[in-house]
Each structure stands twice: as C-alpha cells, then as structure tokens.
Image (tube, coloured by chain):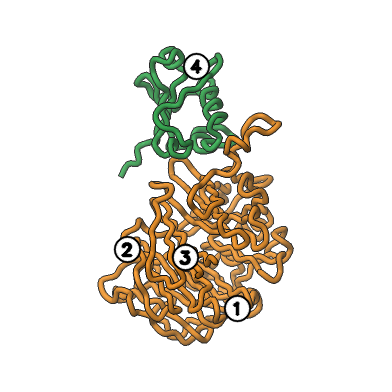
Chain colours: A orange, B green
Amino acid sequence: MSKVRVLVGTKKGAFILTADGKRQKWKVNGPHFAGWEMYHLKGSSVDPNRIYASQTSGWFGQIIQRSDDGGKTWNTPGSSSDELKGPEGMPKGESNKFAYEGKVGTHKWYDGTQHPWEFKRIWHLEPSLTDPDTVYAGAEDAAIFKTVDGGKTWKELPGLRSAKGQLWQPGAGGMAVHTIILDPKNPKRIFIAISAAGAFRTDDGGKTWKPINRGLKSQYELPDPDAEVGHCVHRIAMHPSRPGVLFMQKHWDVMRSDDAGEQWTDVGGNLPSDFGFPIDVHTHEPETIFVVPIKSDSEHFPPDGKLRVYRSKTGGNEWKPLTKGLPQKDCYVNVLRDAMAVDSLEPCGVYFGTTGGQVYGSADGGDTWNPIVRDLPAVYSVEVQTLP
Amino acid sequence: MIRVVLPYHLRTLARVDGEVQLDVGEPVTLSSVLDALEACYPALRGTIRDHDTLKRRPFVRFFACKEDLSLELPETRLPDAVIDGTEPFLIVGAMAGG
C-alpha cells in the first residue's frame, strides 16, 4: 500500500509526518535540527529517500543538510570523514558556501540607492526531476544556485540577477527567490519568483532569464502600470501535465497564464480576499486549484477569523470555500507561501501548515480536513512525498 | 592541547559533546585555533566566520580568561592559560536581546 511522508519546516526545527495511503493515522517524527529555522525540506522525485533541507540561524548562518535514508539520518554534504580523505588533504566543508558569481553588483535599496547583494539564507530547494545529485536553491538576497554533486558545492546561475537586478528592491519580508518550478517537458525551462521583484523564466537552462510579469497590476506598490519588474509575486504553481499553464498568488490578486508567463489575467473572481501566500494545483485535475485567502497586506490572518481554503474547479474565477474540519471562529493564523502541498494518491491529498503550528491534511481533495498535528512551532514549509 | 567550548547548536552540528580538544602548533592565535577547529569539523566552516573573508560572523563572540577577544585581530596570540590548557577558549552565540 502506498504511503505518504510530509516534510515540515518550522521556525524551530523540522518534522516528518508519515501515514499509510488512507492518511488517517499519523506518526510525528522530530524535531530534527531542534532550535534551528528550517526554511524548506524537499525530496528528490528520482530517489525519494534523498531529501535536502535548508537549515538557518541568525547566529551561525546557512547549513545544507542531506538525508539518504528518507530523513532518518542527516549529514552536511561533503563533510563526512570518508569524503574528507581526498588527495587534496584539507577538508572542503563548502556545502553551506553560497558565493555570488563575479562582481557582486548591486540592487535597489529601501532609500533608492544601490546596495550590494548579501547572501542571507536559502528559502527553497528544488531537486532536479532527473538527477538526485542536482538541486536548485533559491536564495535571499535573490539569486539561484545549483549543485550537481549532491549539495557538496553550489554555483550561482548569475544570469538571473542580470534580468534588471539593479531595479529589484526588497520588501518588508526581504528579497528572496522563494519559488522554483522545473518544466517536466522542457529541461531547459525553469520558472522562478522573487518577492517584490516578480516572476522570471529561463529557456536555456539558467544562462539567461527574462521577467514574465505582463498583465500583473500592482497599483499600490508600483506607480508604473507597465513596470516590468517590482511585482510582489508570492507563489506560482503548475500542473506537470501542462507546463505552459501557471497559476499565481500575488501580493494582491490571483492570476493565471496560459502561455508560460507571457501574459497574466486575474482569476480572483468571487474570493473574499485575493491577498494570500500559497497556491497549489490538484494532482489529478489540472484546472482545480487551491488558495488560502488572507484578509489584507496589513492583517495577515483569515477574513472573519475563519480559516478557509478556497478551491476553484474551473482554473480560477469561480471559487468555493472548504471549511469542514477547519476552525471557523477565532482563528488568526497565516499560511506561508511554501506551506501547501499535494500528494499524488487517489483521491488527492492536500496539506498545509500555519504560523500557529498546525498542519492540516485532507485525504479527499479538500472536502474535509483534519489536523495532523496542532502545536508545532510556526510552520514555514510543507512538502509531501508519495511513496510506494 | 587547546580546549574549545562550542555553543549548543554548533556542538550538535559538529556532533560533539562537551569540550573539543585541538592540537594547534605555535603560534596559537585566534585564526590558527579556528583553522584547526574547521579542519577537524568541516561542518563548522562558514558558521563561525565567513568562508572567504574569514571575518567573524556578527553574532558570534570569542571569550577566554574572562576577556572578550571578539574584536581582536585574527593573528592575536591567545592567553597563556588557553595555550597550556588551563582555561578553555569559548565560542559563544551573542545575546539575542528582546
């Protein structure tokens, strides 16, 4: 029988939640890396026991962790005693070294001046669809890095920062590459999104990138209605069967593109608020999408204290609230951008975590929800693996 | 032997309990002790000082013999009591405030 493994990154450690295919009884394992901020954990689709994790600390900086046994044990890649007995002698220990390529350059600072790029942390790890040793990493300050040796060393793909990087300006939440989507039908094509800069696409494997923000409206943040960069994209989602169709939760607005980001249209329709962070697509229904409306940019909690996932079965515009099993009064949590995921079982499982430490799961495509665990630290990220 | 006390999170990262003992040749300085520490525990590289510039991370402090050595130059020789093993060299996570 199939199993699911939910990887949860929190403000104070990582947790691994497991269940069989019924997804009714859960085991909670953790905390791993207790006390550290765990921005993101994600497994390789080629080798599900290979999991990468981004571990960070305001004191000690960035750490990359890797598990080769499904999260039972972890190592910083390239730092084991076996790997250090190389002919060069000195240990490398460079799995946490994220150096910008070439001249560091500058981006726009809060006061309008130019400010040098400074690496802070990795927000998102996206393992390759074909090679378990290849992973892309989204960084703050915004940049994309790549490893081809299982996380031992990382190199920047600097072409991204050439896409008008001097005009990018951090928002209050920082300036990070938080979304990386690999096109399963075109290995040269990658989509990424940066808070307060926008969405970008490469069609040549990461050498060159272009902004894909036409149709986005940000009248309260950007006075220029045709601004090519500067849009606060919160999340992008794609169904693997249709890589040209993208869905976006923006700072305000839920958007859709049917041409790989060339043009976006508003599909917020009847949502009670089109502000929010995560967006995801149903595994078996490419036109079914999920969002979690948040009251506003000033009040990061659900409208009316009711935690509601909204589902559209029409690719947007027509939305219905999903409330069964979710708190419908006095709920003032947020759901962060990387904290929603879907499994590939039938019916589709949907999962999300909250800043209040709850992880909710639905084993029926969102019709009903149950808390898998209620009292974790604030949840930063949720990923799910469907295992044989 | 030089005795080094790591903060909790770096002990878990390096997978050590208690003090670390390092064999460091003369001259025993801030940088030579950190070099030796990172050579023995490469997972610590980049967590105490920057990979390339070797500058101390802003919220890491170096204490020894009731003195704060954080602002001393890397080539500063450590106190004799640290060098002869009487006193430990402390690597500390700075106070978080709040």
As helix, strand or loop, the secondary structure at mark 3 comes to loop
Q: Do marks 3 and 4 share a chain? A: no
Specify which label sits upstream in the sequence, 3 or 1.
Answer: 1
Foreground: B71 or A289?
A: A289
As helix, strand or loop, the secondary structure at mark 4 comes to loop
- Write down the chain letter for disc 2: A
- Write down the chain letter for disc 3: A
The residue lying at 29 percent from left, 70 percent from top is: A331
Reading the image, the residue beneath label 1 is A257
| Coordinates of residue A75 in the picture (x, y in percent) | 53, 44
**What is the spatial separation of the Cα atoms under label 1 and label 2, in whole angstroms?**
36 Å
| Coordinates of residue A42 in the picture (x, y in percent) | 53, 58
Q: Are marks 3 and 1 in contact (CB under 8 Å)?
A: no
Using the image, determine if residue A125 lies above or below residue A372: above
**What is the spatial separation of the Cα atoms under label 3 and label 2, in whole angstroms?**
19 Å
The residue lying at 46 percent from left, 68 percent from top is: A340
- Hey, what amino acid is under mark 2? Arg
As helix, strand or loop, the secondary structure at mark 2 comes to loop
Viewport quadrant of the C terminus of chain A: bottom right
Using the image, determine if residue B78 lies above or below residue A209: above
